[in-house]
Amino acid sequence: MRLHPVIPMVVRTLTRPATIGGHRLPAGATVGPSILLVHASPENHPDPDAFRPERFLGQNPPTNTWIPFGGGVRRCIGAGFSIMEGVAVLREVFAAVDVRTLGSDVPKVRNITSVPRDGARVRISRSASIDR
Ligand code: HEM
């Protein structure tokens, strides 16, 4: 969700003038906070290209450094449910089998979401940690 966020950016329309990134913008301007850039910033995530999910163990990421569900009053209403569902499913899957990705993880745009360009092909094998 950090390296390949489902939605690359959100969009807001300014209701009053604001200065963002040093640019003075008028009311009515459309701004697009980039989830991709926030997640790829080495200031937010050292060695940002590395897939190292354990970097989040024992601590929540600081505010506005991990925003796959957007932010503010329009943040995704399904965020809590999605996290709960993802953890429940992945816990069961990884407890039972080892999963290895096959091929590239290059994304492509599908409607407004980002999906694996060549599909999400994986190889599944019986978990070495389980005696069946
Ligand atoms: C991994 C799963 C999901 C991801 C990554 C995701 C991501 C997002 C993002 C980035 C936004 C835009 C937020 C913003 O503008 O700041 C959004 C909005 C929204 N999401 Fe999700 N979403 C997920 C699952 C769900 C689910 C399961 C539901 C419904 C049960 C849901 C319902 C909505 C709704 C209704 C909005 C619009 C909220 C508004 O504009 O006030 N999403 N989501």
Image (cartoon, rainbow, N blue to C red):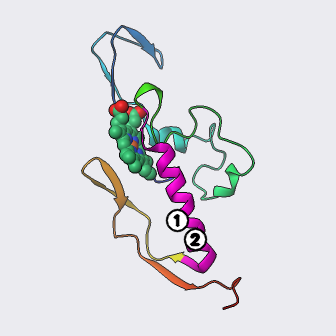
Residue at position x 32%, y 9% in the image: 26
Residue at position x 75%, y 48% in the image: 58
Q: Which residues are magenta?
A: 75-99
- Does 79 lie within the magenta span? yes
Relative image position of residue 12 (x, y in whole percent): 34, 25
Amino acid type, callout 1: Val
Residue at position x 58%, y 36% in the image: 65
Q: Is residue 44 above or below residue 28?
A: below
Residue, disc 1: 89
Relative image position of residue 112 (x, y in whole percent): 28, 47
Neighbours of disc 2 within 10 Å: few (<14), some (14-19), many (20+): few
Instruction: Point out the residue furthest to the right here.
Output: 58
Asked if the residue at tag 1 contacts the one at tag 2, i.e. Cβ–Cβ closer than 8 Å, the answer is: yes
Relative image position of residue 83 (x, y in whole percent): 52, 51
Amino acid type, callout 2: Glu
Residue, disc 2: 92
User: With 24 as the anchor, is 42 left or right in this view?
Assistant: right
Q: Is residue 131 above or below residue 108?
A: below
Main secondary structure of the magenta stretch: helix
Residue 60 lies in quadrant:
top right
Viewer-closest of 94 and 30? 94
Label 2 residue SS: helix
Q: Is residue 48 above or below residue 71?
A: below
Label 1 residue SS: helix
**Marker disc for residue 12:** none
Viewer-closest of 49 and 15? 15
